[in-house]
Image: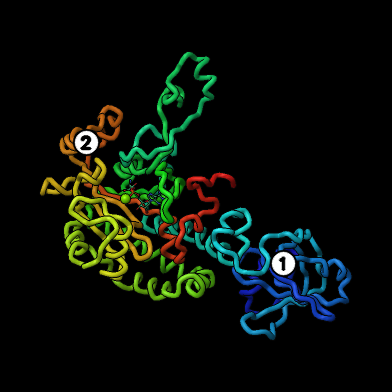
Amino acid sequence: MKRTKIKAVLDMANPPGEVFVQGWVRTKRDAKDFSFIELNDGSCLANIQVIAGNDLAKYRKVEKLTTGSAASVTGQLVASPGKGQKWEIQATAVDVISIASENYPLQKKRHTDEFLRSIAHLRPRTNKYGAAFRIRSRMAQAIHAFYLDKGFYYLHSPLITGSDCEGAGEMFRVTGLDPADVQKQGRMDFSRDFFGQEANLTVSGQLSAEMFALALGDVYTFSPTFRAENSNTRRHAAEFWMLEPEMAFCDLDGDMDHAEELVKYLVRHAMDHCREDLDLFMRFVDKNLGPQLETLVSKPFARLPYTDAVEILKKCGRTFEYPVEYGIDLQSEHERFLAEEHFKTPVFLTDYPRQIKPFYMRMNDDGQTVAAMDLLVPGIGELIGGSQREERLSVLEARMDEIGLDKDPYWWYLDSRRFGTVPHAGFGMGFERFLMMLTGISNIRDVIAFPRTPGSIDF
Ligand code: 4AD
Ligand code: MG
């Protein structure tokens, strides 16, 4: 008989009679003549209850099933008398696939997130992490669905690169050659060990995306990105996924409209397609999550210039750990105050002082600020960072000179401003930060399968 996934079994409108399922035992309770087995196969949050009577041929073995063991079950699907669940299985055969040792760490009790991080290879078997990673998968697929529908092309930008898009010097060096080989070849410069050139893991696919937007029109990259910032915070990881749309013939307003549409689409998509998993987070992780997501999809996001935000922060009467003045890079405490307490919605800050933003952002007419935007959201702070790009060759070159950036390695980037340059804009959204906002999970380590943060490289 063909295996049916438990999700499909539980979704059935009418019982087909006999079904065949396979999964792992979450709990087993023994009564006098029966065992009740809660079986889960990862296809959904819910378990299916299996009733195994002691008249079964292999009942002796069934009695030995421990939490975490794997089993195959054939049986009749019947209406469940218990509340909450529609169907249960009256087993006609139970085959033990494997018995989990008694020291299986995931016994039925609440475990702390810290403990579960230390067994990241097992935590997707818990309700919370199973739900988180099913949602993560669905949201990645939703991103592609959104862009397919809009006629964007999906660009695979390189992960190994010679350039530093953000100019923040936060790149991991790629050390491809064995130092012994480098010496043998008579080259002593270890920094140039990508076949004789310097190479890094990318911090952003933006510069590649710009080249393709100026060819294919609308494109996006969605891939791993790497930051060597040694900051042990709950919202920074050394390896994370970033979504980066880039659009030709688009200005800063168009960029923000697009970002708002995207975020709302993804949240609605989760509400429609991940209901059961999302409910778990609304009930057990953050009681405010439901109303917060409702507000997010129904209300327009606020938009205001950086300068006005600084005024709000200065006058709000709150003492921040990091004092506010014009020109500072806003900290997470400032960003969260604006989104959570002042506006109570996500908020776009625009037109930042050029000194705190990268070289590629378009200079505003005031000569001081650039056409940048950051989207700040409750619970997280910065979710998105983007801008209209400087498409004017002479202004771009002057800006690179001003910050002392060597133009030679960017000859190809500057070419795009020589040959058919047009206004264009884009942004980057941290995928993990989006998932944190969506689930209320407060630590980035808990939305990444095997997080890469200082000190965690084992799994
Ligand atoms: O603001 P960032 O640095 O912008 C860029 O890299 C641009 N080149 C994007 C673009 O315009 N195409 O990063 C974008 C987003 C941030 O808003 C944040 O959500 C996320 O990436 N991010 C991180 N997420 C997790 N861990 C880190 N260390 C992150 N650094 C940035
Ligand atoms: Mg940023």
Query: Dividing the picture into quarters, in which one does residue 267 lie?
Result: bottom left
**Residue 177 at x, y percent in the picture:** 51, 25
Q: Earlier in the sequence, mark 2 or mark 1?
A: 1
Q: Is residue 144 above or below residue 459?
A: below
Query: Dividing the picture into quarters, in which one does residue 22 lie?
Result: bottom right
Image point (83%, 77%), residue name: 53
Query: Dividing the picture into quarters, in which one does residue 436 lie?
Result: bottom left
Amino acid type for the residue under numbered disc 2: Ile
Q: Callout 1: helix, strand or loop?
A: strand
Residue 403, disc: 2
Marks 2 and 1, how far apart at CA: 60 Å
Q: Callout 2: helix, strand or loop?
A: loop
Q: Can residue 218 be seen from the camera position used here?
A: no
In front: 188, or 111? Answer: 111
**Residue 297 at x, y percent in the picture:** 35, 70
In front: 229, or 100? Answer: 229
Which residue is denoted by mark 1 in the rendering? 25
In front: 91, or 4? Answer: 91
Neighbour tally class for label 1: few under 14, some 14-19, many 20 plus, Cα within 10 Å: many
**Residue 226 at x, y percent in the picture:** 43, 43
In front: 247, or 59? Answer: 59
**Residue 428 at x, y percent in the picture:** 35, 51
Is the distance from the Cβ of mark 2 to the nearest ligand 1 atom less than 8 Å?
no
Neighbour tally class for label 2: few under 14, some 14-19, many 20 plus, Cα within 10 Å: few
2 relative position to 239: left or right: right
Which corner quadrant holds the N terminus?
Answer: bottom right
Amino acid type for the residue under numbered disc 1: Val
Image point (24%, 46%), residue name: 356
Q: Can residue 313 be seen from the camera position used here?
A: yes
Image point (72%, 65%), residue name: 67
Q: Is residue 4 above or below residue 358?
A: below
